[in-house]
Amino acid sequence: MQIAIRVPAARVKRLVVPLRQVPVLPLAILLLLVLTALLAPVLAPGSPTEQNLGKRLLPPAWVGGGSWDYPLGTDLFGRDILSRVIYGARISLMISMTAIGVGGLFGILVALPAGYLGGRVDMLLMRAVDVALSIPTILIGIVLAVTLGPSYEAVISVIVLFVWPRYARQVRGETLAIKQRDFIALAKIAGSSRARILIVHIFPNLVPTLLVLSSLQVGAAIIMEATLSFLGVGIPPPAPAWGVMVADGKDLVVSAWWVSLFPGIAILLTVLSLNLLGDWLRDRLDPKLRQV
Amino acid sequence: MTQPLLQVENLRTYFLSRWGTVKAVDGVSFSVHPGETLGLVGESGCGKSVTCLSILRLVPQPAGKIVGGRVLWEGEDLLKKSEVEMRRIRGGCISMILQDPMTSLNPVFSIGDQVAEGIAIHRRLKGKTLWQKTAEVLGLVRISSAKARLRDYPHQFSGGMRQRVVGAISLACEPRLLIADEPTTSLDVTIQLQYLNLLKEIQRRSGVAMIFVTHDFGIVAKTCDRVAVMYAGRIVEIASVRDLFSRPAHPYTRALLDSIPNLEEQVDRLYSIEGQPPALHSLPPGCAFAPRCPYATRRCDHEYPPEVSLNSGHMALCWRVA
């Protein structure tokens, strides 16, 4: 009798799986987005703001009546949509990164002492977070825009307001869990000061959480910026913000669908990629799922 | 006898809880002399760990509070020291090893960094000298090729090795008292023996005094000079190891010793102490062990027994020996 020896399929597969698990497509899209933002002046075929009223509402090149001078067509003022979408990447990235940076930092600065010290400090700071979470951010954005006029600063402030309590919540919860761990006790026994324990022992353990949270929050920030711009209280025209462009086309959807569609697709792809990347990061970095 | 290194007098640490005041440590007194090993024995929840944390003033805040007593370190009361002074004492003079080596190390730092931290704080070394000293300390706890492993992370070490790394962290600044809170409980038996031998050897070489918390009488016999038996937040008997094993005075100590299975005798059932230890938030007015004590009298239920000195250094808290 003969026994066939087969290489177990699982072993062959195992080499392939990690590579397949990496979200290649989202990463590629995000890389493309960053490159686009950096190289906007090189990549864009035309100016994002130059109007050409003789060439209003030209359809995309592959539709009848379109021309390759304007690959994605033109808007109501004859501006090149492709160029505007490309420059829009700059605005979206700049706004969301700045806002996440400021909001995240603020949230962490509030939450670390709250979680570590506990007691009354924690109570006060976390009630402040609850208040911040219950503020209708869009409404604040509208009020700000109406009173101070739409500006980059106003949009960033609104997103900061939206983002920091979310960071604070997450960081505080994590800090509470980490401070109970034995290695913190051991650090105390070794004579570390409070500040040292917070900065040297707790903070580095928060980094995975912050990475995951940030990738998801950048997506939320981009949506927020687009929403405000769509409502006309965000980035002031004629700057080519994606939200503004979607709003520009909203009355023309039936006749000139391309005005809204392409910036809409840009928002969709960016946010979707960020969310997929965030999910993947969470699975990868979660200590409970990670092999010890 | 020389002056004690550490003298704990009437230490009381209470926890405020939903059910009332939990008297985790209720009037504990003992002393540790330079170079000696004091065993601290008792069942779970009798206040052994809280006693140790109280010495370092690291009782979990804000629930726990040291409400009374004195902790004299070479004659100076640690309970009156400022937080900054305490930090110099922790790690520098008194150090501690925790029970679970799997959680005692910070997963995001290399072990070199973690051992070096204490040395950097207390000895103010930097750069190459710091790294050199770190490797030296790791060699002391028999981490082979210590220098090469400085940059490894905790997950690359086995449980026994991690506990040795924890030992290295605690011993890095040559403390004069090491509190070992069940350091071998989570190690397997062969590694336990290895670790105990290592601690003994380090003690021989450096003369560090130890408080050894355990509930294993085998370890007590092997490592300790004197033993304190704790029950419900108090030390009920304290004696030299020889006296305790040959002439246990307190019924609880005797019951504990009787609970050790004897391989020579054939028995149907192993001996165990009847009943449960009392809830620490509603202790009886008399002896806390009375409800489980086979010799209890009416007096035991109502009056707390006095400290009785039997002979030099042998003390018990019981009406029977009074």
Image: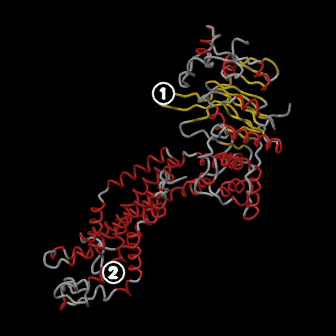
Q: Is residue A40 left or right of residue B63?
A: left
Q: Is residue B270 left or right of residue A223?
A: right
Q: Are marks 1 and 2 in contact (CB under 8 Å)?
A: no
SS under mark 2:
helix
* Image vertical order of residue B61 relative to residue A197, above or below: above
Identify which residue is drawn at 76% across, 57% down. B133
In the rendered image, which residue does mark 1 sit on? B19
Q: Quadrant of the C terminus of chain B?
A: top right
The image quarter containing residue A48 is bottom left
SS under mark 1:
loop
Q: Closest to the observer: A268 or B319?
A: A268
Q: Is residue A58 left or right of residue A130?
A: left
For badge 2, the amino acid type reads Ile
Q: Quadrant of the N terminus of chain B?
A: top right
- Residue extending farthest right: B1
- Residue extending farthest top: B298
Judge the density around disc 1: few (<14), some (14-19), many (≥20) Cα neighbours within 10 Å. few
In the rendered image, which residue does mark 2 sit on? A86
